[in-house]
Amino acid sequence: MKKEFKTESKRLMELMINSIYTNKEIFLREIISNASDAIDKLHYKSLTDKKIKVKKDEFNIFIDINKDKRTLTIRDNGIGMTKEELETNLGTIAKSGSLDFKTENKKKENIDIIGQFGVGFYSAFMVASKVTVISKAFDSNAAYSWESSGVEGYTIKESEKETNGTDVILTIKEGEEYDKYLDQYEIRSLVKKYSDYITYPIKMEVTKRRAKSEKDSEMEEYTEVEVINSLTPLWRRNKKDIKDEDYDTFYSDKFFDYEKPLVHLHNSIEGTIEYNSLIYIPTHAAYDYYSKDYEKGLQLYSNGVLIMEKCADLVPDYFSFIKGVVDSPDLSLNISREILQQNRVLKTIATNIEKHVKTALLDMQKNNFSDYLKFWDAFGLQIKAGIYNDYGMNKDKLQDLLLFYSSKEKKLITLEEYANRNKDEKEIYYACGDSVEQIALLPQVEAVTSKDKEVLYCPNYLDEFVLKVLNKYADKEFKNVCSDAIDLETTEEKEELKKHNEEAKDMLMFIKDAIGVKDVKFTNKLKNHPVCLTSSGNISVDMEKVMNAMPTNENINAEKILEINEAHPIADKLKDLYKNDKEVLKEYSKVLYASARLISGLTIDNPTEITNLICDLIAK
């Protein structure tokens, strides 16, 4: 007699089969997890009831494929189910025997039950036209068969089964898209993908080929039962028993990267929240790392069962380069096990992982700087972006990971090194440009370094934006040497310069009007260079370059100031022209301004005009 499911409506069954699971192949993971639960229950009872004589090494899960009958069978020798339990657990959708068992024994330790929501079993109907469950409870003489073709209902009747445990027999649907679930290689790959770390052997009869004899090259097929899962994952093993080579091999096999990682972080956390994690920092960026197609995330397991290939919620964007796995029995899963609830456990694990990664990077920076340079070369841009993004919310977390090229050290250094070396300074000086070599030749850099000041070189387009977000480090304010706010002169030098500018204010105003900048003035900070370009306000000359290179219609302009070396012969030449030939002074002014723009890495709007002016001036 067929019975109807004890749900509010048949629509719930349809919803579960067609909507809750977005990936059909998940059915095998669910059924294997249920089989593992059934074995767990019997194993636990054997530990508490001396009358039950079973050995853990006798437990296993067996997968059988019958292509002729189109059946896929998953068999376990666990605790099995009585007729009443079949009725309760399979006849009522969302009724979980595993959850009941865990609740009953919640005060007892070492209970590892994967399935808690009682719906995973019904994912079988995504690939099966009929599901038959034959089960015999431990210490029972009777076996029963539960059978259903879906929403129409189910039947339960007596059956035959010699040993305790449960057989789940799936009659696979017709059609090419379902044929793969009768292929041993496909089933094997799904086991490796989702259930590789189930703690009991998963066995399957595998077809192999061999030579008929030592002298005969003709091949023959034969079958052999194999254990197709790895059982104990590396991250659950004791760290003292694992060699570096084991970690590297796991990384290579798991993430298809044949270059050794820079570091691995293996943590086993116990207490209020329990989890194991194995995190790697790669040596190089993935080929698509800096593209929109890249997906961050760690592989997420619950008791050795893969839940998500890439759990993005475990990784902040600025550490999106890390690879690895997290396995926790404390993670609450939603009804389908495919999408994690945003709960306290997940957030706590994510916070801990972030701390572990940062600590490892700082340790690498201090104790293995050559490796840190490899990391910085691959992922430094991501760290800078992490500081700049989100309005600088994460700047305090990441600032100590930054590296900049030092004018004194002639190598990359940290901000901490700069601050410790220049304790008496109130500022951290920096300069921007297209390359370290180009920055070193800037007149403004020479002016600052000539006073024995250290300058950080910023050749990356993000550098100045990052320093603007940081604003300060160790109470030292960042100052661009190409800003007009740089003040390194003595009081006497300032008074002398003020006098020169006051005397030449009419000429300087004339030049300003001729070239169209915010200001023109004499300076005493340049040594051999005749001119330089500085800026006033929040937008520097280099920020103008970066922002105008972006694909927008905005035209950003820094407030430019042309500074003329008052000790250079060009100053006297300009004064002479102002008295005797103002038209030629205009030409000189345009050429000087164009020169200053080129030194700063800016383009010239009218190169033909400037070239002609230079040739005319040379010819005079």
Image (cartoon, grey):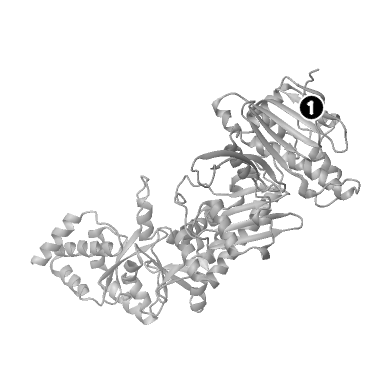
Image quadrant assignment for residue 332 = top right
Q: Identify residue type, mark 1.
A: Ser
Image quadrant assignment for residue 602 = bottom left
Q: Nearer the viewer, residue 515 or 74?
A: 74
The structure residue drawn at horizontal position 44% and vertical position 68%, both measured from the top left corner, is 404
Image quadrant assignment for residue 138 = top right
Where disc 1 sits, the SS reads: strand
The structure residue drawn at horizontal position 76% and vertical position 49%, both measured from the top left corner, is 57
Tally of numbered discs: 1
Q: Is residue 234 visible?
A: yes
| Image position of 524 (left or right of 108) | left
Q: Identify residue for label 1.
A: 145
Residue 227 rendering spot, x and y as whole percentages: 66, 46
Question: Where the N terminus falls, by quadrant?
Answer: top right
Q: Is residue 67 above or below residue 579?
A: above
Q: Residue furthest left?
A: 620
| Image position of 106 (left or right of 399) | right
The structure residue drawn at horizontal position 57% and vertical position 53%, both measured from the top left corner, is 316
Q: Nearer the viewer, residue 550 or 299?
A: 299
Q: Nearer the viewer, residue 220 or 407?
A: 220
Question: Where the C terminus falls, by quadrant?
Answer: bottom left
Q: Is residue 102 visible?
A: no
Residue 289 rendering spot, x and y as whole percentages: 47, 51
Q: Residue furthest top?
A: 1
Q: Nearer the viewer, residue 191 or 278?
A: 191
Q: Residue furthest bottom?
A: 492
Residue 423 rendering spot, x and y as whole percentages: 51, 78
Q: Are there few (<14), some (14-19), or many (20+) residues within 10 Å of tag 1?
A: many
Residue 262 rendering spot, x and y as whole percentages: 53, 63
